[in-house]
Image (spheres, rainbow, N blue to C red):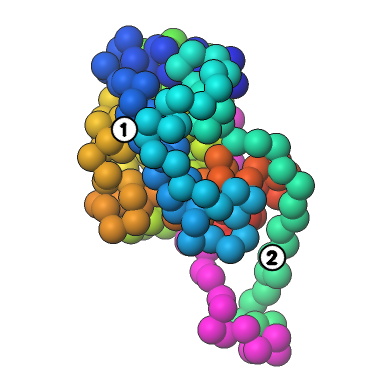
Amino acid sequence: MDIYAALCRYHMKTYGTTQRQIAAVAAKNHLHSVHNPLAQFQKAFSIDEVLASPPIAYPLTTLMCSAISDGAAAVVLCNAAGLKKLGGAGRAVKVLASVIQTGSNRGLEEREKIVAHLAARKAYELAGVPPGDVSVAEVHDASAMGEILNAESLMLVPFGQGGPAAERGDFTVGGRIPISPSGGLESKGHPIGATGLGQIH
């Protein structure tokens, strides 16, 4: 969380992001978790309650950070014939793109070289889907700041606009682009190795 906190402070200095905007992400995720029966934590908190929770590393408080959880996730990969045999036609999900991207040396100001941004650009191109066509997203948000950073890297909002978008409610279910309707890792839980597949589910 000390690394996330340092990224928070850089984002705050560079773009004017506020601690309240970061807390808005956490409050939204805790609100979403109330509707997820599989979430580890299912209690809504207001922005003020998130801000008042015990500090971790400025500007992060406890309710802005995920707990490490126990959990598991599994998927069945098959072709159309296998899907028919399993009787799962109504539950099938077609994966349009899957990208693995390595990082590179970059300065903090070189946003276009952020590993998530590079992977997103490749995935959108492979899938033939522009960012504006995304209607919902689950992002890696071990801290509330992670959601802001990933929303920007995924081009769901311009760089520097994740905080204001969160505060406006753009990332809430019913908002412009709902992010982490599961409750995010802060509420749904973060079972490390199972996290990615859990988010796909």
Please identify the quarter of the rendering in which residue 37 is found: bottom right
Q: Residue at x 32, y 20 (%)?
A: 18
Q: Mark 2, mark 1: which one is toward the viewer? A: 1
- Which residue is tagged 2? 75
Left or right: 6 as drawn, with respect to 10: right
Quarter of the N terminus within the rendering: top right
Left or right: 123 as drawn, with respect to 37: left
Check residue 108 for magenta coloring.
no
**Residue type of the residue flagged with mark 2:** Val
Q: Foreground residue, 188 or 108?
A: 188
Between the residue at mark 2 and the residue at mark 1, the CA separation in whole angstroms equals 31 Å
Q: Residue at x 70, y 37 (%)?
A: 68
**Residue type of the residue flagged with mark 1:** Gly
The residue segment tinted magenta is 84-102
- Which residue is tagged 1? 162
Please identify the quarter of the rendering in which residue 76 is found: bottom right
Picture coordinates of residue 116 (x, y %)?
48, 34
Instruction: Tell me the element at label 1.
Output: helix
Counting residues from the N terminus, which is met first, the one under dot 2 or under dot 1? 2
Q: Foreground residue, 149 or 123?
A: 149
